[in-house]
């Protein structure tokens, strides 16, 4: 389409015209492609990015042919637009090497990504993808878990995290899952995979995220900020759930760990959200340590205080854990708070340390 296109300026090949007319070889040989230009628009409930990738899987090198070969790509420029938010990204100085097999594609790729806020960083990727139904059927027969259709290892240096917006259309409730605006930069390694059941998994290894700004999904004028965060562990997003495995996140507000799953709809809270409705059933365990001073400064609508009142010191430790299977949809919530001190004008109030434990069903 005019909105999404894939153009090439120059192609070199070892093959001659007679090879192409009387195609009998099982190998394409070596190709060199220069001046590649890609553009796509990502919209609500749309999968343009996924369709571009799938078209490559279905049509490269020749539809229906079982061939192999190597393609070196130089001078790549790619542009992407998020139609929902107006966000734009450009990839420059891109280069890649693609190795083709009858039922799969493997590639290495590098380039520089810049968003429309001026944030720029370098990225290097190693990608593999399978387009053979026989491959997935064989793997499914020997494994009860979904098989990977594709895998990607990303090594990032100050890459704009606003790129996350491009996955919005991959989920039915993408608008509630992905913030309307997100900014910041990421450095470190991420391993991504897409399963045959549509789930996407990310494994963070030494990932550092700086200068984060996130707009509330219910009010884009309300901004949450975080100067520095580190992430380790695995996170999976499927059609209905967020699943964490040995996931640990450290931020300005404190630290959180997760080994379990909960619904997408539990991700975002607002002043209008009733706490007990937000505490939906989980399967597993989630813990958090929260600095109340930092939370009051950065999330004022969560830590609701009277005008002129501020928290001077205080920390909360929370734990949510699912109960045995015979108590379906129930979990234990435990809270501990150390000495809490607040100040209002010239008056100081202090609350003694306290603890709380309850079963929520």
Image (spheres, rainbow, N blue to C red):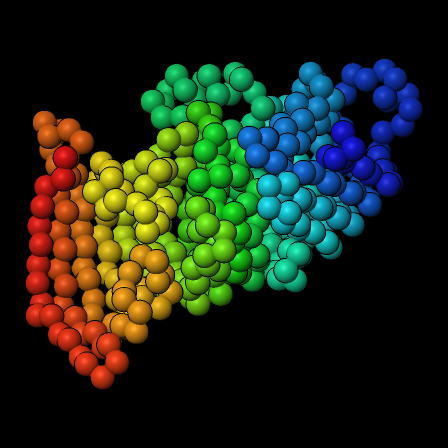
Left or right of 16 on screen, residue 45: left
The residue furthest bottom is: 346
Left or right of 63 on screen, residue 160: left
Q: How many marks?
A: 0
Left or right of 233 on screen, residue 70: right
Where is residue 228 shown, x and y percent of the image?
42, 66
Residue at x 43%, y 59% (from the top left corner): 224
Which quadrant is the N terminus positioned in?
top right
* Above-or-below relation of 326 to 346: above
Which quadrant is the C terminus positioned in?
top left
Depth order, front residue of 190/102: 190
* Above-or-below relation of 163 to 150: below
Q: Residue 256: name its quadrant.
A: bottom left
Residue at x 78%, y 43% (from the top left corner): 37
The answer to whether residue 307 of the structure is visible from this angle is: yes
Residue at x 47%, y 30% (from the top left corner): 172
The answer to whether residue 245 of the structure is visible from this angle is: no
Where is residue 91 shown, x and y percent of the image?
69, 51
* Above-or-below relation of 319 to 175: below
Residue at x 44%, y 25% (from the top left corner): 197
Left or right of 174 on screen, residue 272: left
Where is residue 196 shown, x and y percent of the image?
47, 25
Depth order, front residue of 261/36: 261
Where is residue 341 shown, x and y percent of the image?
18, 74
């Amino acid at each position: 389409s005019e909105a999404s296109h894939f153009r090439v300026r120059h192609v070199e090949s070892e093959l001659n015209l007679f090879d192409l007319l009387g195609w009998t070889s099982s190998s394409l040989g070596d190709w060199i492609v220069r001046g590649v230009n890609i553009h796509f628009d990502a919209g609500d409930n749309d999968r343009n990015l996924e369709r571009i990738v799938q078209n490559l899987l279905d049509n490269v090198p020749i539809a229906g042919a079982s061939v192999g070969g190597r393609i070196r790509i130089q001078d790549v420029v790619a542009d992407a637009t998020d139609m929902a938010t107006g966000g734009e990204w450009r990839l420059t100085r891109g280069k890649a090497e693609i190795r083709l097999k009858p039922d799969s594609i493997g590639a290495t790729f590098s380039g520089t990504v810049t968003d429309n806020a001026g944030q720029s960083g370098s990225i290097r990727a190693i990608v593999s993808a399978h387009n053979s139904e026989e491959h997935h059927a064989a793997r499914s027969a020997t494994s009860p878990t979904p098989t990977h259709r594709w895998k990607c290892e990303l090594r990032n240096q100050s890459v704009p995290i606003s790129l996350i917006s491009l996955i919005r259309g991959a989920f039915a409730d993408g608008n509630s899952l992905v913030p309307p605006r997100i900014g910041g930069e990421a450095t470190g390694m991420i391993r991504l995979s897409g399963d045959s059941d549509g789930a996407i998994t990310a494994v963070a290894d030494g990932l550092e995220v700086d200068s984060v700004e996130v707009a509330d999904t219910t009010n884009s004028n309300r901004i949450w900020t975080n100067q520095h965060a580190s992430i380790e562990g695995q996170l999976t997003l499927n059609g209905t759930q967020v699943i964490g495995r040995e996931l640990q996140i450290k931020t300005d507000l404190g630290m959180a760990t997760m080994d379990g799953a909960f619904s997408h709809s539990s991700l975002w809270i607002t002043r209008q959200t009733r706490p007990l409705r937000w505490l939906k059933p989980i399967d597993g365990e989630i813990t958090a340590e929260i600095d109340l001073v930092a939370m009051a400064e950065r999330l004022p609508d969560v830590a609701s205080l009277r005008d002129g009142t501020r928290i001077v010191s205080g920390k909360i430790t929370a734990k949510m854990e699912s109960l045995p299977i015979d108590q379906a949809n129930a979990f234990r919530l435990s809270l501990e708070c150390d000495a809490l001190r607040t100040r209002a004008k010239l008056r100081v109030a202090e609350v003694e340390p306290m603890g709380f434990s309850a079963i929520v069903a």
